[in-house]
Image: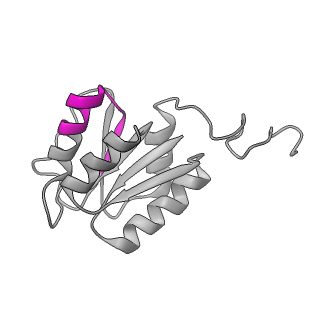
Amino acid sequence: MHVLIIEDEPLIASHLECFLSELGADSCDLAQTERAAVAAALDRTPDLITADCRLREGSGVDAVASIRRSLGSIPVVFITGDPRGCDARDDMTHMLVKPIRWLDLATAVASHNLPPANGPDGRGHTAATGG
């Protein structure tokens, strides 16, 4: 599973990348601006997007809208400190308010039934064999 993380706080982006790896992401692109997010998505289509609604340069909401116009409906988890103006009206979109609980993020990601990374357990091997 390839994830695009749209977040302008490097520490938060790093924590999200680590946690999403534990959830089965085998690759992540990080973007701090609206323009960088759209470019990253067009370069490599993500299976999932996490996005802060407000960025220092541009908007995560606008980035997601542009990406979806170009690539179709991609699952999104908005992660924001201020949910005003951050709309999650469809079944492909979740919204979590900072500070988030990792269990809530895991639940939001799992609800999209995304493919595992490199194997049935997302770690390149089967859970039953550990190999």
Where 123 sits versus 65, above or below? Answer: below
Examine the image and state in which quarter residue 125 appears: top right
Extent of the magenta region? 65-78
Residue 41 pos. (x, y %)? 33, 43
Q: Would residue 20 be counted in the magenta stretch?
A: no
Where 125 sits versus 57, above or below? Answer: above
Which residue is pictured at 63% across the width and 41% down the height? 117
Pick the quarter of the image with the N terminus.
Answer: top right
Residue 113 pos. (x, y %)? 52, 29
* Residue 131 as seen in the image, left or right of residue 91: right
* Residue 73 as seen in the image, left or right of residue 119: left
* Residue 86 as seen in the image, left or right of residue 73: left
Residue 92 pos. (x, y %)? 33, 29
Q: How many marks can you see?
A: 0
Residue 10 pos. (x, y %)? 36, 72
In the depicted view, which residue is nearer to us: 47 or 89?
47
Examine the image and state in which quarter residue 30 appears: bottom left
* Residue 11 as seen in the image, left or right of residue 69: right
